[in-house]
């Protein structure tokens, strides 16, 4: 099969976004609304997902499915990326922390929606690869470091929004502390096999309110001793 052209990928992204919109409409009861933010859908339509998967998997990049990226990690399916981004609801002036960079796809989707994205990846090889791929696309408002994402990135805290792309039994306390009052965190919470996509809102008094939405399946949040 010959290499996908930019024209081909643009068409496939439009189809992908149309499919995401249909899925969101069908999940309106779980999401609490029938349509995702047009800004999120525009970002999904703009970011070339095939640029963030291993090259042999590029023909599958616009299917609504997770794909392996090495080190027992995956890139999340597009619908989940869109829903998590929509629930996070980043504003143009926001500073966002992402936990679990992978190869940088979710990072690239967040970048045009916020002022600055700081991303932490525990696997050095993935972090370096993500930096290179994002750099090739000219994404400038992103910083990546290798480390334990459960500890956040205290030098850049507090954050307006935090997105965690790995599952935990409960939200890491360091991340809760680094979330600005009035801020929001989105992450999968639950056991090994299945979790619930969860939104945590911190009010201006520092109290955290939690609500669970869709069932999802993510790999576990890795921590360093």
Image: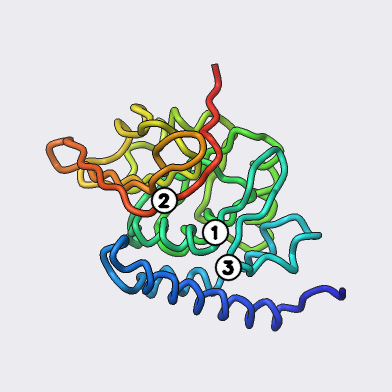
Horizontal side of 86 relative to 103 (left or right) equals left
Classify mark 3: helix, strand or loop: loop
C-alpha separation, residue under disc 2 versus residue under disc 3: 25 Å
Q: Residue at x 74, y 65 (%)?
A: 58
Residue 35 x %, y %: 34, 74
Horizontal side of 105 relative to 32 (left or right) equals right
Q: Name the colour scheme.
A: rainbow
Of pointers 2 and 3, the one earlier in the residue sequence: 3
Residue extending furthest left? 205
Classify mark 2: helix, strand or loop: strand
- Which mark is drawn over residue 108? 1
- Which mark is drawn over residue 47? 3
Foreground disc of the pair 2, 1? 2
Of pointers 2 and 1, the one earlier in the residue sequence: 1
Q: Residue at x 50, y 34 (%)?
A: 192
Q: Which residue is mark 2?
A: 215
The quarter of the image holding the N terminus is bottom right
The quarter of the image holding the C terminus is top right
Foreground disc of the pair 2, 3? 2
Horizontal side of 103 relative to 113 (left or right) equals right
Horizontal side of 85 relative to 122 (left or right) equals left
Mark 2 packing: few (<14 Cα in 10 Å), some, or many (20+)?
some
Q: Are marks 3 and 1 in contact (CB under 8 Å)?
A: yes
């Amino acid at each position: 099969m010959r290499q996908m052209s930019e024209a081909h990928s643009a068409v496939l992204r439009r189809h992908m976004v149309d499919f995401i919109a249909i899925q969101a409409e069908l999940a309106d009861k779980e999401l609490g609304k029938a349509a995702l933010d047009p800004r999120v859908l525009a970002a999904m339509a703009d970011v070339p997902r095939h640029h963030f998967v291993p090259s042999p998997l590029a023909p599958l990049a616009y299917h609504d499915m997770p794909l392996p990226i090495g080190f027992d990690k995956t890139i999340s399916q597009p619908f989940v990326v869109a829903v998590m981004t929509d629930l996070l609801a980043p504003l143009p002036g926001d500073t966002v922390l992402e936990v679990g960079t992978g190869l940088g796809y979710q990072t690239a989707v967040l970048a045009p929606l916020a002022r600055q994205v700081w991303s932490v990846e525990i696997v050095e090889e993935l972090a370096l690869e993500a930096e290179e791929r994002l750099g090739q696309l000219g994404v400038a408002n992103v910083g990546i470091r290798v480390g334990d994402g459960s500890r956040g990135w205290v030098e850049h805290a507090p954050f307006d929004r935090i997105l965690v792309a790995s599952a935990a039994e409960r939200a890491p306390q360091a991340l809760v502390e680094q979330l600005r009052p009035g801020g929001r965190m989105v992450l999968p919470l639950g056991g090994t096999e299945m979790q619930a996509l969860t939104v945590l809102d911190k009010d201006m008094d520092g109290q955290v309110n939690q609500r669970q939405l869709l069932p999802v399946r993510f790999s576990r949040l890795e921590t360093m001793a």
